[in-house]
Amino acid sequence: MFKKLLKYDFHSVWRFWWILAVTALGLTTVSSLLLRFLLYTDGGFVMFRVFAALITVASLAVVVISTMMTPLVVYLRFYQHFFSDEGYLTFTLPVSRKKLLLSKTVNALIFLGLEAVLLFACLTLISLIVPDVDDGAFLFAFKMFESIGESIGALWQTVGAWTILYLLEGLLILVGFGILSTSLIYFCITQGAVVARKHKVLAALGIYYLVNGALSFLSSFLLSVSITGFERAMPYLEAHLSSQGLFGLIALALFLTVMLMATLALTAYFLTQHLLERKLNLN
Amino acid sequence: MNEPTLVCRHLSKSYVPGLPVLEDFNCSLAPGKIIGLLGPNGCGKSTLMKLVCGLLVPNGGEIVICGQPQSEATNAFISYLPERTYFNTWMKVEDLILYFSDFYSDFDADAAHRMLKELGVDPTARLKTLSKGTKEKVQLIMVMARKAKLYLLDEPIAGVDPAARDYILKTIIGNYNKEATVVITTHLIYDIEPVLDEFAFLGFGGRILMAGDAKKTRVKEGKTLDDLFREVFRCSRSF
């Protein structure tokens, strides 16, 4: 049943997403080719340059729109499938609400991942097609990748093999951020639907700002406490810890960040599951 | 003796504290019957169906479906037609058939295609291109193409023309699983009356004011159920 749910959830977003993805990739390719042509032909006609500029702006706009629209569509589908009239179909399926929620969460993560891949592909397309010339604003992407490589190299020079652990933890933080955002938004939408009979979306937005405000306060508080603690402990650490110990401490701090995000995400996820199973009255 | 398809014990539900829609509601529905749940607006007919399907959480009481407490597992036995259109409008009719085939093991895709053909609905049409009446008929076809144990039909003939009502009733009678229980709610008692085996008049709070065998009651009272309904609920809010 879970596979079937995922199949239909995936299809409901995919039918919209592939159009954005193909448009973004197509426009990026065309704009990259046009820019390359302009570089080699020393400009060409004014109209052609204007056309190239327009295509470039359009491709950037589509990439930006796609980045914003994908999560929006995923969350909108969550709302529609569960809390609009479609909920009458969704919740009368012989499927547990645990599986319904899991399917929606996995689907969201798939599309957030696909969106990241699309963004990376668009930037890579620009950097690959534009020739390797040192100056020129269009080489931003290429230079960006180059500078990322240089930063990782510099980190390796300083901390050695710890780099791998830091990169892994950084990746986990990115994934964790995606999961946390999705879980929180699903929780707010569900809570909105539970507390409000009419203005569910408005209620969800209100709850989202409340929860986000509380989390921002909590994270600011934790950050200030950690910085103060670290400043106080620094002389002691410098005196008693080797450089390897210090690097290990940084890895531990990153790991704790991952754990904190995971805890928050799981809390939001299970609260949503509880609301769906015990509190939801579909009206 | 056959196990009841649906049993409700001391069921209660209120949307607003102190104003119960259903209060201490009890019933036991036998298989193989078409039962009319008849009552004025707000007496809890739709609420009862939603509770049985798990769309609402009861404040108290117990619901047992085919011997099992209400849960997502019992949804496999229930074929529910809500009073609103509830399908994804971007889906094609044939997508819906695949969807139902995927999730309901008792769904008969051939029967669905046959009923669509009888009605002249193009299976390749998208739901958003269909009229409201046709969408409702497609919903009914999806629901009746299942070989369920309990059919819950909430206002299946409301908002459609008299010719369509005949078609809908014919579809219900011709396609339901004969060992199943069919529960129909409606205000249009005159239209639905001929197909009912049993009936129950529901007053406010879900109180059962009158219930029994439809045919025997008609003979005994010398009136149609429609006339009886008008008499029981005549110009009074005290029921």
Image: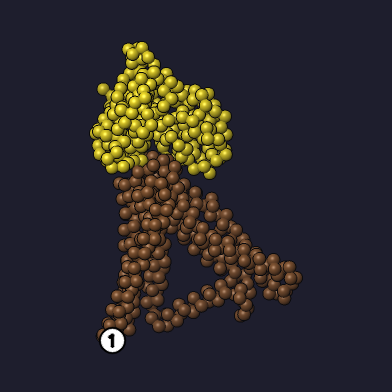
Residue B68 shows in the view = no
Asked which quadrant contains residue B125, the reply is top right
Image point (56%, 58%), residue name: A21
In the figure, what tint was chain B given? Answer: yellow
Say which amino acid is labelled 1: Pro
Residue placed most toward the observer, B114 or A227: A227
User: At numbered mark 1, what does the secondary structure look like: helix, strand or loop?
Assistant: helix
The chain shown in brown is which?
A: A
Asked which quadrant contains residue B180, the reply is top left
Question: Measured along the vertical axis of the image, is residue A146 above or below residue B32?
Answer: below
Image coordinates of residue B207 in percent, x first then y, are 29, 29
In this rendering, would A32 be left or right of B147? right
Q: Which class describes the residues within 10 Å of circle 1: few (<14), some (14-19), or many (20+)?
A: few
Residue B186 shows in the view = yes
Residue placed most toward the observer, A31 or A232: A232
The count of marks equals 1
Image coordinates of residue B86 in percent, x first then y, are 46, 40
Label 1 belongs to which residue? A235
Question: Measured along the vertical axis of the image, is residue A34 above or below residue B122?
Answer: below
In this rendering, would A69 be left or right of A43? left
Residue placed most toward the observer, A178 or A216: A216
In this rendering, would B231 be left or right of A14? left
Question: Measured along the vertical axis of the image, is residue A161 above or below residue B34?
Answer: below
Q: Which residue, as the protein is rendered here, is positioned at the far right? A: A45
Asked which quadrant contains residue A105, the reply is bottom left
Image coordinates of residue A273 in percent, x first then y, are 33, 51
Q: What's the coloring here? A: by chain
Image coordinates of residue A145 in percent, x first then y, are 52, 74
Image point (38%, 81%), residue name: A159
Image point (31%, 27%), residue name: B239
Name the chain under label 1. Answer: A
Image point (43%, 52%), residue name: A201
